[in-house]
Image: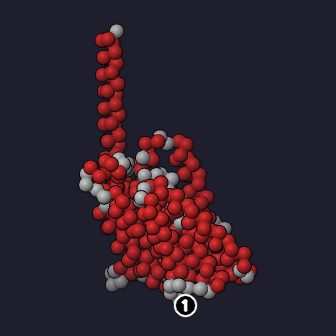
Amino acid sequence: MPGSMVLSMKDIDSARLEDLRVAQAKSAMGKALFPVGGLAILFGMVLWAASWGASSIGAGDVLASVLAKLFPSSVASPGRLADTIVWELRAPRIAMAVVAGAGFAVSGAAMQGILRNPLVSPFTVGISSGAGFGASLAIVLGIGLVGGGKYLVIGNAFFFAMLSAFMVYGVARLRGVSPETLILAGIALMYLFSASTSMLQYIASEHELQGVVYWLFGSLASATWSNLAILSAVFVLCFPLLMKYSWDLNALAAGDDAAASLGIDAPRVRMVVMVLASLMTAAIICFNGIIGFVCLVAPHITRMIIGSDHRFLFPFSAIVGAILLLAADTVGRNLLAPAEIPVGIVTAYIGVPMFVYLLIAKRRQYFQ
């Protein structure tokens, strides 16, 4: 009997080692294939988005237009119409979808890392509700604390989004910067700003109410090259800094005590990463309105493929987020043409079933 028990324990240990080897092999394979496959899918999505619309053009014309722009002396242009459709109508919106989707996904992965919770996103700390209140304040009352003119709504939305993030951190600082305190403070501020936005909607005129509701839906229809340049600059600034903290986030996954034993200041890491993620999310929302679920779903899809190592999770989540938002915007733009479905609605329809599936069908280890 003892011999059989020893043999059984050896068999169990061998099985666990084999499972670990298989998991490591799958993770290594995912890390090797993901960039190639993900970028190939994204490139195909860009061609599809650029060619599908009210005035459909072939993927070949899209490629020819891009090559003619890059190499004007060596490639023949596909024609004035194709160039206008690609570069003036669709390219800014496609590029905005790619950058915004990447930013949302990276921000979501960062927030889930510092809070050690798979159900949180930058919206959890009240960024979306703060931005919605700021935009509503500008639309209904014409009050702008930052910016003016065409940037009145954008500046106001950005200011209140960042104000919400700093208020959450300020409240949490009084009780210790723990994941639980940050989440609870964020939920409280989210309800406060949501109630304030509802009050503004209640007193708004019909025209003002329509503007508020449309902004809250989220849309990429107003994408321009100048807005894209600002958003890209924010992404380029924040992304390398988040990558710098990838090892710290890996250590935080084991708990604050384990991170402290490695010389990591957990409260400081949470503060810096939360500010960077909030800055990136606020910049996206202020230009495009509230677009949900990309920051929640994209990191989970990436974890299923390559694991939870933030050194790989950040860049690969960016690819997944870009694909998801570009696909959602393209579908919303064309599904009921000439009418357009705001991308915030489409991402909810796509994100909710996908997230429920991940919760039900996948093992708990994917969310750790």
Residue matched to label 1: 149
Label 1 CA crowd tier, 10 Å (few <14, some 14–19, many 20+): few
Q: Position of residue 250 (x, y in %)?
A: 33, 52
The residue nearer to you, when weighing 110 against 36, is: 110
Q: Residue at x 47, y 57 (%)?
A: 181
Q: How is the image coloured?
A: secondary structure
Instruction: Locate residue 157, reporting x and y percent.
Output: 54, 77
Query: Which residue is painted at 34% across and 18% down in the image?
Result: 8
Q: Is residue 55 above or below residue 252?
A: below
Secondary structure type for disc 1: helix
As drawn, the residue found furthest toward the right would be 206
Q: Could you tell me if residue 128 is visible in this image?
A: yes
162 sits left or right of 273 in the view: right
Q: Is residue 45 left or right of residue 356?
A: left
Say whether residue 338 is left or right of residue 81. Answer: right
Q: Amino acid at mark 1?
A: Gly
Q: Residue 218: percent from the left, percent from the top?
A: 58, 71
Image quadrant where residue 192 sits: bottom right
The structure residue drawn at horizontal position 66% and vertical position 79%, both measured from the top left corner, is: 211
Q: Quadrant of the N terminus?
A: top left
